Image (cartoon, rainbow, N blue to C red):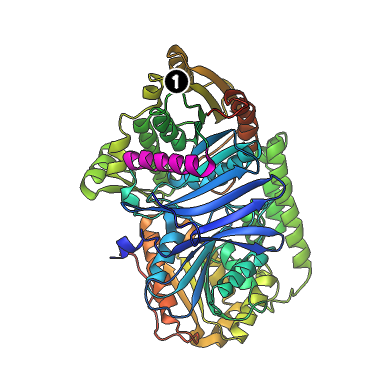
Amino acid sequence: MMHEIDGRSGSETPVRFSAGTEELFGVLTEPTAASRGLGVIVLVGGACSPSTSRNRFSVKLARRLAASGFHVLRFDYHGVGESSGTILKYSLRRPFTRDLIGAIEELRRHGVGQVILIGTCFGARTALSAVGRVNGIRGMAFMTIPLRDWEQGQRVASRWARDEGLQAYIRRGLRLQVLLGMLDAKRRRRYLRVVQYGMKMLWRRLRLHNGNGSGPSLDWISPAFMEGLREAVRRRIPLLFLYGSKEDHYKEFQMAQAGAVGALIAQAGDTVQVSTLEGSVQGLTTIWVQDAVMARMQEWVESLDAHGVQTKDFAMLEKV
Amino acid sequence: MSVDAVTRMATRIDPVLQIREDATLIRDAEHDDMFCVIYRPVSEARGGIVICSALLAEHLKTYRTEVLAARAFAARGFAVARFHYRGTGHSGGVTETATVSTMLHDVAEASEYLSKLADVPLLAFCGVRWGALIGGLAAHSVPGAPLVLWEPVVDGTRYFRDIFRARQMSALTRGEQITTAPHVLEELRTIGFVDVMGYPVHSDLYEGAAGRSLMEVAAGDPRPVLLAQVSRHKELKPEFASLMTAFAAGGSNVETIVLEAEEAWSFVGRPVEANDAMIDGTLPWLTRVFPKERVR
């Protein structure tokens, strides 16, 4: 049954909507069951991925949720897929909030005023960035949301900068392999980005506290992430954090529990759920992971009624 | 074939390129919906181009390439159709319904839709990677249709062999058990599909691709052919050289472009770097092979 639903496009309509100066493309999937009066927006990750996502994950999720009574909008960020514009670089410091607001407004034009946001990695940070900027967010599900900020190509470098002391970071840069690599223009640009990131981290560490209330040991947590999380908890927006147990993003999430993140989640009580899958969710690189994540997402979204109140608890997922 | 144009079409006018894009879900009574985007110049189109998509993870990587190419071609006066094979992308249908046979049907339907909507009697076929193989096989039944092949999959059997090998390498890097080729084929036979980096490769798709090759197109009617190699090789790869020799031997007018670029076609993290070079290399060729005046 679920399998057949994945192929049903009868209630789908391509849409175009404005986001700033850009014209974005999306596909609206209208409910094929009695409408719940709630919309869902699916935000893909940041690796230039179009809104179909790997193995049509977003497409299938949209069709399954529509079969459960939701209006679902999946859309291409500017510069991606069918949308207009150009992306120079993805940066977690600059999520595509404007794109998301355009999508929310598009759903409103279709008569849907309450929305649940489902975001993956960069998409999750984009979802979080909308809190406090738009009303009517009834829940947010974050798949493998990063707590650090980095720009495209700096993920590993930023992790080194966090995990290694300055001396180790500099020693890494003085290795013969790296020095020889400086002769190649492409590698040289990459290494300079690593140095830039290291300098930024050093500057932040020179300040004892950076606003996350956690001190230098957790100073790598994004201030924007903290701000979004605080606001979401203040507004009592139901949140779902979904990670793979072996991901570095989950490791960071666990480390962050020792500081203000942990305090906020405790304050939020049962409006925040954390689920993990064995292995990695990032990239949705196996069909088993896709199926497990989709089932979890669908279960969580369906639990949110129109007033944003969760009606059931969730157990930790395990690999079958 | 029918299109509910009023409620299921999203239109965009590009004021800079002076083109119109219409995205729709084509519905016909016997098949699932097919997602299709038609690009048209503001003036009368001089010809039509059908762009066929790559497959699996390569489709994610090359999605934007196809969109940019379609826009660039339309800006130069061509009407263009892009579409998602049924069972893939935004189209209807479940994944296992997508086979070589159904994909060729989808190309034919997209071609028919383009011809009707844009009133273009002459069509060319363009594809990147797997899309080049499908576009070529589709062109095989259209005598004389120009063909653009971007880093083409020449042979279906070899393509899937390479994909299964990539799956093994991926398992190796993750420290997982490697499945040998015979085991992969056994898995295909017994379970019906194989998980390749999050994509199911179904047995019908695999078996339908077996033995299909651009060489059969080369042995057919002559036509103008442009092949763009996009790889780290400075010289034309032997596989491509053999293909173009076969086309030439059959009377086809062939040209090649060699673009040096490190493209990992299944790695989605970065866009295709050679987009501009592929498109800029193809446009002059298209304007040469299509007559300046519309053929009626």
Q: Is residue B121 above or below residue B245?
A: below
Please give the range of residues in magenta: B100-119
Q: Which residue is mark 1?
A: B243
Q: Quadrant of the C terminus of chain A?
A: bottom left
Q: Quadrant of the N terminus of chain A?
A: bottom left
Residue furthest out toward the front: B296
A263 in magenta = no
Given residues B16 and B135, the one toward you in this image is: B16
| Secondary structure of residue under mark 1 | helix
Q: Is residue B117 magenta?
A: yes
Give the left or right position of residue A72, taking residue B31 as reference: right
Residue B92 visible somewhere in the drawing:
yes
Residue occupying image coordinates x 50% and y 87%: A307
Residue A12, image x and y in percent? 45, 63
Q: Main secondary structure of the magenta part?
A: helix
- Quadrant location of residue A43? bottom right
For the point 34% across and 30% down, the residue is B212
Horizontal and vertical percent position of residue A219: 69, 70
How many marks do you count on the picture?
Answer: 1
Instruction: Measuring from the top left, give residue B219's x and y in whole percent.
Output: 38, 18
